[in-house]
Amino acid sequence: MLLANENIGILDSLLLSAVSMGIIMAILFLIMMMIYLMSWAYRQFKKKQAEKAGKPIVAEAPAEGGENGAPREATAPGSCGELKLVKTSEADAAMIMAIVADNLGEELNTLRFKEIKLVENPEKTEGDK
Amino acid sequence: MDIGQLFVDLAKDSGFAGLFTGAGWQNLVMIIIALVLLFLGIVKKFEPLLLVGIAFGMLLSNLPFGEVFHPEMWNTEGDVDYATVLQKGGLIDILYIGVKTGVYPCLIFVGVGAMTDFGPMIANPKSLLLGAAAQLGVFTAFFLAVCIGFDGREAASIGIIGGADGPTAIWLTKSLAPHLLSAIAIAAYSYMALIPLIQPPLMRLIVPKKERAIKMGQLREVSKTEKIIFPIMVTVFTVMLLPSVAGLLGCLMFGNLLKETGVTERLSDTAQNALMNIVTLFLGISVGATAVGATFLKKETIYIILLGLFAFAFSTIGGLLFGRLMCKLTKGKINPLIGAAGVSAVPMAARVAHTEGLKANPESYLLMHAMGPNVAGVIGSAVAAGILMSVFG
């Protein structure tokens, strides 16, 4: 529209190129800021929702090794955060957690497991011989 | 009835005779070019879904007396007379209406949107800046084209090849420089297919091995709600800011919304498959048909092919240099190679960045990180096209 019927000179084209790159950068920068804002608002909303439901809120840990430093997404209501598995498969961990809950007579979602670790090379006792 | 004369008349009316009269040699050259493109598409698998259609359209419209496409109906100074096109046009004239009106590129964008996962970009919004930086080639080629002597509208259409996005290039060119459409479409799709050859040398030249070997951390998970809000938010914001991108970006985001809502699976499936395939078919054959000898065999076509290569190279360089800057600013948390994926060309450019990263460090998996700038490049090139359309349209 601006230059629809006009020819463009070399200097004008250079100027237009620079301005256009600037506009693209600005628009995509604004979209970037909106995404940050949207993510932040979404996390706040989920946090408030969890508070209203009266569930414990787990503090959000920063994304481990994440290059953008964005905090991790809030865990689902009722979740007790992360469980660290050391040399243990998820299937084994699930079975161990179910057995512990059964032995204690407690609901599984009321227990908090921090870590399940495979103990290697256990020293054999006399009774094992 | 003179049977002998009948055979003479039939021979005169045949395409073979047409090849040796008037500008028939140009058709012959175009038929050879079409066969070469068919070879590249079928045997070398260079963007076969589009290149085979383009090459066949080119072949069809250059067979003398075929009358499937009439360039004179379209290359008019004023508005196209669609009544004449519908009454007297050939098969490809009718299909070409979708190109001329900009319907096909937009419908393809619905399909592209339905196939695109913006998750990696939402997880790492900084990758949008890489998608913006990788539009450098668009404006470098635009500037060079003006220096060579193309007018502003032609230069803008040539520059957009650097956006590495076929539908965007077609969308802009059909409005600004329709006489260059076939050359620009062929250049854009050919170079997109050649990305694995164009980008790696530039990556090794610009990014030192130490930076190429950087291993990036795990991206955060993006919730479904964020993925649903994103296309709506980007459409409203960007179209309000730059209304000329409404067609392209709106369709891209509409397709993506169909994918992410989870309640329009049938529509998403249609957009990704049936619609995409049908439109690709029509687009390829009708764009190829515009490459008739009289308009294609010019020195301008060679300039366009060369400028297209410049555009791709400079877009890659822009992304890589900005990637290096971000690497420095984040103290080595971003591998600059992902900047090269900002040239759009989804997902080829992301795969190339991933492969080069793996070569430098076998434990580095860049694919998902490169998908962020890659899909940001689609938005970036649509915005670049919107700006050029606002200025020259």
Image: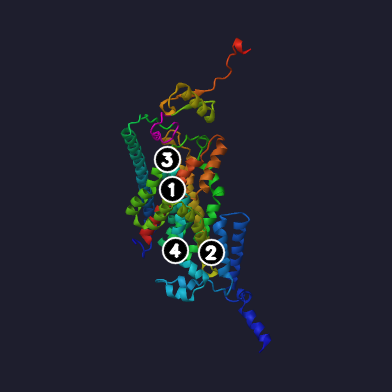
Q: Can see residue B94?
A: yes
Q: Which stretch appears magenta?
A: A64-81
Q: Residue at x 47, y 35 (%)?
A: B218
Quarter of the image with the N terminus of chain B in it: bottom right
- Residue B51 is left or right of residue A39, and the answer is right
Disc 2: host chain: B
Q: Nearer the viewer, mark 3 or mark 2?
A: 3
Q: Amino acid at mark 3?
A: Val
Residue at which label 3 appears: B222
Residue at which label 4 appears: B174
Asked which secondary structure carries label 3, the reply is loop
- Say if the magenta span includes residue B298: no
Q: Can see residue B303?
A: no
Residue that extends furthest to the top in the rendered view of this protein? A126
Asked if the residues shown at circle 3 and circle 4 are in contact, with their CB atoms under 8 angstroms apart, the answer is no
Q: Say whether disc 3 or disc 4 marks the residue closer to the N-terminus.
A: 4
Within 10 Å of disc 4 (Cα), the crowding (few <14, some 14-19, many 20+) is some
- Residue A93 is left or right of residue B153, and the answer is right
Q: Are marks 3 and 2 on the same chain?
A: yes
Q: Amino acid at mark 2?
A: Ile
Q: Say whether disc 2 or disc 1 marks the residue closer to the N-terminus.
A: 1
Residue at which label 2 appears: B285
Asked if the residues shown at circle 3 and circle 1 are in contact, with their CB atoms under 8 angstroms apart, the answer is no
Within 10 Å of disc 1 (Cα), the crowding (few <14, some 14-19, many 20+) is few
Q: Nearer the viewer, mark 4 or mark 2?
A: 2
Within 10 Å of disc 2 (Cα), the crowding (few <14, some 14-19, many 20+) is many
Q: CA distance from mark 3 to mark 1?
A: 15 Å
